[in-house]
Image (cartoon, grey):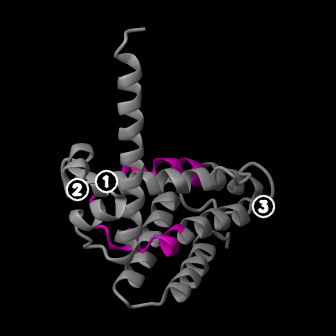
C-alpha cells in the first residue's frame, strides 16, 4: 500500500458522504418544491454549490440521481413482498400500493416529465408484474383474455395516469389511489 492510500480513502469517504448529503437534501427539498435551486440544495446539504456540481454536473444529472435513488428504495421495499405465494392478484395490488406510497412520500415523482417509450427504471417492476400476472393467469385469478405484456403496459400507464391526475389537481391522492385499485381490479379480474 502506498503512503498516499489512506489520504485517497479519506477523500473517497468524504466524497461519498457529500454525495449522500446532497441526494438527501435534494430529495427533501424537491419533495417540498420541485423547482428548489441547486444553491438551496447545497446549503441544506452543508456543501458548496461547486461540490454539488462536482458530483452532479447539471441539475438534470442531479434529478436523475434522485429518481434513481428513489427507484432503488422502492425496489428494496418491493423485494420484501412474497411474490411466489398467496393470491397473485392480492400481491399485485400490494405491489401497486407500495409504488403509490412512494408517490405519496415523494411528491417530486409526480412532477417529473414523462418519457416517451419504455423507461429502464420500470424494469424491476415490469419483471415482478409479469411474474405475478403469469402466476395469476395459471391459477385463474387473472384474465387470460389479454397478453401479459399488454397487462403490464396497462398497469404502468394506469399508475402514471393516477399520478398525473394528482399532480394536476384533478384528483386528491386518496381518490386517485382508490380509482387506480378499482381500475386494476376491473382490468385483471377474469370475466
Query: Which comes before the other along the chain, label 2 or label 3?
Result: 2
Q: Give the answer, above or below, for where 48 lies relative to 38.
A: above
User: Residue 111: which quarter of the image?
Assistant: bottom left
Whole-percent x and y of residue 143?
A: 64, 64
Mark 3: few/some/many CA within 10 Å (<14, 14-19, 20+):
some
Whole-percent x and y of residue 169?
A: 37, 90
Query: Which residue is denoted by mark 3 in the rendering?
Result: 87
**Disc on res. 149:** none
Whole-percent x and y of residue 33?
A: 32, 77
Indicate left or right for 65 with 153 as reference: left
* Element marked by disc 2: helix
Query: Which residue is denoted by mark 2 in the rendering?
Result: 60
Disc 1 from disc 2: Cα separation: 6 Å
Residue 113 among magenta residues: yes
* Element marked by disc 1: helix
Query: Which residue is denoted by mark 1 in the rendering?
Result: 64
Whole-percent x and y of residue 144?
A: 63, 59
The residue at the far top in this view is 1
Asked whether the beta carbons under mark 1 and mark 3 sit within 8 Å of each other, the answer is: no
Residue 153 among magenta residues: no
Q: Residue at x 34, y 64 (%)?
A: 44
In which quadrant of the rendered image does the N terminus lie? top left
Query: Which comes before the other along the chain, label 1 or label 3?
Result: 1
Asked whether the beta carbons under mark 1 and mark 2 sit within 8 Å of each other, the answer is: yes
The chief SS type of the magenta part is: helix
Residue 153 vs residue 38, the one in the foreground: 38
Q: Residue at x 35, y 39 (%)?
A: 15
Magenta residue span:
102-130
Amino acid at each position: 500500500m502506498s503512503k498516499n492510500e489512506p489520504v485517497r480513502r479519506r477523500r473517497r469517504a468524504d466524497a461519498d458522504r457529500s454525495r449522500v448529503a446532497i441526494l438527501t437534501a435534494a430529495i427533501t427539498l424537491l419533495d417540498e418544491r420541485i423547482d428548489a435551486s441547486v444553491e438551496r440544495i447545497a446549503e441544506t446539504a452543508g456543501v458548496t454549490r461547486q461540490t454539488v456540481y462536482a458530483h452532479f454536473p447539471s441539475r438534470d444529472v442531479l434529478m436523475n440521481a434522485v429518481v434513481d435513488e428513489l427507484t432503488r428504495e422502492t425496489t428494496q421495499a418491493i423485494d420484501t413482498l412474497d411474490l411466489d405465494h398467496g393470491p397473485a392478484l392480492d400481491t399485485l395490488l400490494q405491489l401497486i400500493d407500495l409504488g403509490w406510497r412512494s408517490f405519496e412520500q415523494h411528491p417530486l415523482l409526480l412532477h417529473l416529465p414523462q418519457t416517451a417509450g419504455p423507461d429502464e427504471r420500470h424494469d424491476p417492476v415490469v419483471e415482478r408484474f409479469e411474474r405475478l400476472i403469469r402466476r395469476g393467469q395459471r391459477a385463474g385469478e387473472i384474465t387470460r383474455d389479454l397478453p401479459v405484456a399488454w397487462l403490464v403496459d396497462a398497469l404502468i400507464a394506469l399508475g402514471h395516469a393516477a399520478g398525473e391526475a394528482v399532480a394536476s389537481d384533478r384528483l386528491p391522492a386518496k381518490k386517485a389511489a382508490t380509482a387506480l385499485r378499482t381500475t386494476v381490479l376491473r382490468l385483471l379480474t377474469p370475466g
